[in-house]
Image: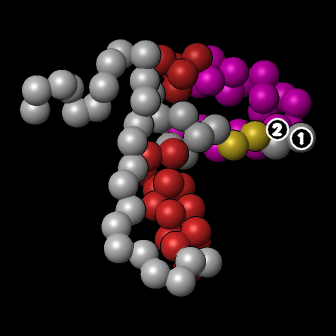
Amino acid sequence: MNYIDLGDDDDSAMALLELDEPAAEARITALICCGMATGLVNVLARRLSEQMDDVETIELAWVTSGGSIPPEGT
């Protein structure tokens, strides 16, 4: 079984890098840090917009435990 990770943060990347040797020994290909925000969200938005009659705008929001993005007041 192979693995693709859609995370894009340092902590998860470092944890996954520690699994490199065991994964290689198990002949598992792991693609890490492929990122939702850096590409897949855009691909999904376009794909969904192609299925609609008209699209005026697409608004994306990213929710984290660290608060709102952009921070409130900006």
Point out the frontmost of discs 1 and 2. 1
Q: Say whether residue 29 is magenta.
A: yes
Residue 21, placed above or below residue 27: above
Q: What number is the disc on residue 45?
A: none
Q: Residue at x 18, y 25 (%)?
A: 72
Three-letter amino acid code at disc 2?
Ile
Task: Residue 67: name its quadrant.
Answer: top left
Q: Earlier in the sequence, mark 1 or mark 2?
A: 1
Task: Please rate how many residues cluster around mark 2, counting C-alpha atoms within 10 Å: few if below 14, some from 14 to 19, many from 20.
Answer: some
In x, y percent, where is residue 12? 54, 22
The image quadrant where one finds the C terminus is: top left
Of 74 and 30, the residue lying toward us:
74
Q: Residue at x 59, y 24 (%)?
A: 17
User: Which residue is labeled 2 in the image?
Assistant: 28
In x, y percent, where is residue 66? 35, 16
User: Which residue is labeled 1 in the image?
Assistant: 1
Per the image, label 1 sits on a secondary structure element best described as loop
Distance in Å between CA atoms under marks 1 and 2: 6 Å
Residue 63, placed above or below residue 51: above
Q: Say whether residue 9 is magenta.
A: no
Of 11 and 49, the residue lying toward us:
49
Q: Are marks 1 and 2 in contact (CB under 8 Å)?
A: yes
Q: Residue at x 41, y 37 (%)?
A: 62
Three-letter amino acid code at disc 1?
Met
In x, y percent, where is residue 57? 34, 67
Count all numbered tags in the image, as a single digit.
2
Q: Which residues are magenta?
A: 16-33
Q: How is the protein colored in the picture?
A: secondary structure
Of 66 and 21, the residue lying toward us:
66
- Seen as rendered, the residue at the extreme left is 74
The image quadrant where one finds the N terminus is: top right
Task: Please rate how many residues cluster around mark 1, counting C-alpha atoms within 10 Å: few if below 14, some from 14 to 19, many from 20.
Answer: few
